[in-house]
Image: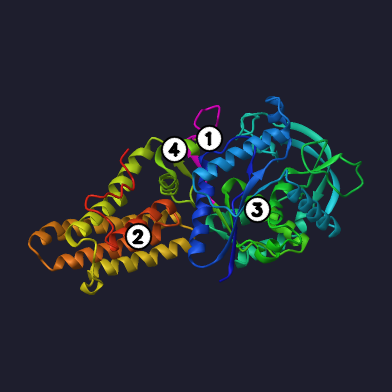
């Protein structure tokens, strides 16, 4: 059967989830469901990154203990993922004892390998990014993402010897042993390495909200494991690193799915840390583009945050899953236009797949009582078109081109609509033409293909369609009984 371990990033617990987080979670869930349908033993990890100075500051502003603050944020993510039908295997929180214990053991491995050394850092630090920034990347002295001036800091840190591993990582990326998809992100990663990547901090000085650094000569509690080093290790701790049964069973990751803004951390830092710890590297990293809303980065200040729970309440979980993944190719940066959701819902779902199924099932029950005989054969052109669609769909899925895979399916749906209008089954029925049986068989054949293709995207709605077909074929479907899959909005 084979295993398949795939991950979402763990999102930073500084606020409630928005559609950027939802896009990645839905994308990963669709891939996980597809792998399950192929018989794979799938482990799908999700979670929250709950440490760092930004969390500490946010909690303080709201007069809350950091743990209480992150507990509330965690609940908002769990609710959002439930509303979107995200079926993760486990949800890790970096404040959990399971994670903390694994991180301490992992960091000790890096220390014992001689890859952590004491040093001093002086420079600019953006609390919003939880990362050091270069002056040349600022805009009018401000972080371009958070529009705040970074802090000038000078502190004693412990650093990871990244340079030691860069040549080997570069070689593995170039050979495809560490496969980065799409090629544009692979080239971006290699370009970063060519331009020079520095050793990075694995600790911060004087930060209380985090995991204390277990090594070195600093007084107890003075050094805290840097939030990025802490967070990356979640992919191992969620499996029970180092001795858990799931870790033994599922490591290494078959696929990390991340956004472009965290490429460096996953494609360069993380493989180096794994090499130091003596662990096999992830097999593939898929890096999707970044989302904006109406041309602007999502921001509470601007007021363009779109709540996934509100979307699910309006359109339904499966419709939102479709709307998120069908707006643009995941490999590219994309702009979400919220006002387009209703139009696209009506055109693609209500008038598209919903209407095709409704009219097809109605004709099957009205003209043949739901009982179709496979011996009557199929339309060869539709059969050939289905084979071509399946081939393209499979190829797109293999390369995580979910937008393109959906486009394949909906192009085939349009072909069936054209087929109905051309063959006019209502006229065939009126004239008692035997060709009607071929047409109805062909429609059922096409629909059965469509439900297999769409099931990872719309698991709940496709379940309804399957039940409707069972009722149809067992003679339990009454005339006039509607499926009502996607009512018009």
User: Measured along the vertical axis of the image, is residue 85 above or below residue 443?
Assistant: above
One can see residue 46 in this view = yes
Which quadrant of the figure has residue 224? top right
Q: Which mark is residue 450?
A: 2
SS class of the residue under badge 2? Answer: helix
95 in magenta: no
Query: Disc 4 vs disc 3: which is toward the camera?
Result: 4
Q: Which mark is residue 298?
A: 1
Query: Disc 2 vs disc 1: which is toward the camera?
Result: 2
Q: Horizontal and vertical percent for residue 401? A: 46, 57
Q: Which residue is mark 3?
A: 266
Residue density around tag 3, few if under 14, some if 14–19, many if 20 or more, within 10 Å: some
Q: Which residue is mark 4?
A: 313
State the CA–CA distance, disc 2 to disc 1.
Answer: 34 Å
Q: Point out the image quarter for the N terminus.
A: bottom right
SS class of the residue under badge 3? Answer: helix
Q: Point out the image quarter for the C terminus.
A: top left
Residue density around tag 4, few if under 14, some if 14–19, many if 20 or more, within 10 Å: few
Q: Nearer the viewer, residue 21 or 365?
A: 365
Give the residues drawn in magenta, as a range.
288-306
Q: Horizontal and vertical percent for residue 125? A: 72, 36
Q: In the image, 128: left or right of 117?
A: left
């Amino acid at each position: 059967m084979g295993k398949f371990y795939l991950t979402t990033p763990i999102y930073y617990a500084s606020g409630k989830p928005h559609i950027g987080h939802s896009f990645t979670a839905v994308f990963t869930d669709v891939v996980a469901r597809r792998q399950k349908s192929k018989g794979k033993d799938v482990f799908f990890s999700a979670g929250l990154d709950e440490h760092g100075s930004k969390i500490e500051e946010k909690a303080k502003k709201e007069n809350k203990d950091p743990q209480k603050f992150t507990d509330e944020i965690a609940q908002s993510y769990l609710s959002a993922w439930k509303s979107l039908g995200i079926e993760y295997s486990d949800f890790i929180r970096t404040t959990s004892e399971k994670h903390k214990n694994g991180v301490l053991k992992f960091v000790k491995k890096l220390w014992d390998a001689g890859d952590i050394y004491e040093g001093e850092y002086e420079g600019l630090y953006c609390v919003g990014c939880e990362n050091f920034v270069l002056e040349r990347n600022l805009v009018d002295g401000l972080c371009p993402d958070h529009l705040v001036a970074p802090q000038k800091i000078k502190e004693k840190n412990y650093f990871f010897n990244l340079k030691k591993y860069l040549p080997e990582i570069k070689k593995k990326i170039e050979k495809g042993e560490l496969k980065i998809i799409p090629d544009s992100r692979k080239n971006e990663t290699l370009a970063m390495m060519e331009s020079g990547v520095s050793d990075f901090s694995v600790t911060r000085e004087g930060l209380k909200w985090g995991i204390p650094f277990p090594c070195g000569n600093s007084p107890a509690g003075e050094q805290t494991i840097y939030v990025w080093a802490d967070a990356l290790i979640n992919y191992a701790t969620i499996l029970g690193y180092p001795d858990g049964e799931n870790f033994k069973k599922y490591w290494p990751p078959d696929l990390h799915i991340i956004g472009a803004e965290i490429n460096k951390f996953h494609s360069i830092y993380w493989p180096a840390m794994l090499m130091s710890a003596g662990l096999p590297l992830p097999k593939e990293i898929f890096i999707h583009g970044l989302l904006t809303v109406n041309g602007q980065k999502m921001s509470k200040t601007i007021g363009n945050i779109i709540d996934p729970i509100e979307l699910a309440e309006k359109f339904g979980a499966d419709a939102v899953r479709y709307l998120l993944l069908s707006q643009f190719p995941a490999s590219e940066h994309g702009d979400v236009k919220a006002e387009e959701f209703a139009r696209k819902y009506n055109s693609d779902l209500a008038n598209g797949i919903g209407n095709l199924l409704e009219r097809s099932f109605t004709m099957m029950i009205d003209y043949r009582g739901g009982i179709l005989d496979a011996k009557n054969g199929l339309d060869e052109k539709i059969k050939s078109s289905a084979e071509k669609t399946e081939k393209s769909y499979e190829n797109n899925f293999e390369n995580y081109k979910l937008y393109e895979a959906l486009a394949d399916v909906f192009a085939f749906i349009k072909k069936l609509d054209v087929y109905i209008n051309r063959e006019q089954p209502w006229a065939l029925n009126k004239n008692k033409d035997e060709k009607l049986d071929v047409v109805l068989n062909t429609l059922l054949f096409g629909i059965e293909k469509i439900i297999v293709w769409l099931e990872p995207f719309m698991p709940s709605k496709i379940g309804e369609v399957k039940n409707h077909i069972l009722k149809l074929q067992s003679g339990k479907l009454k005339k006039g009984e509607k499926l009502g899959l996607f009512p018009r909005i």
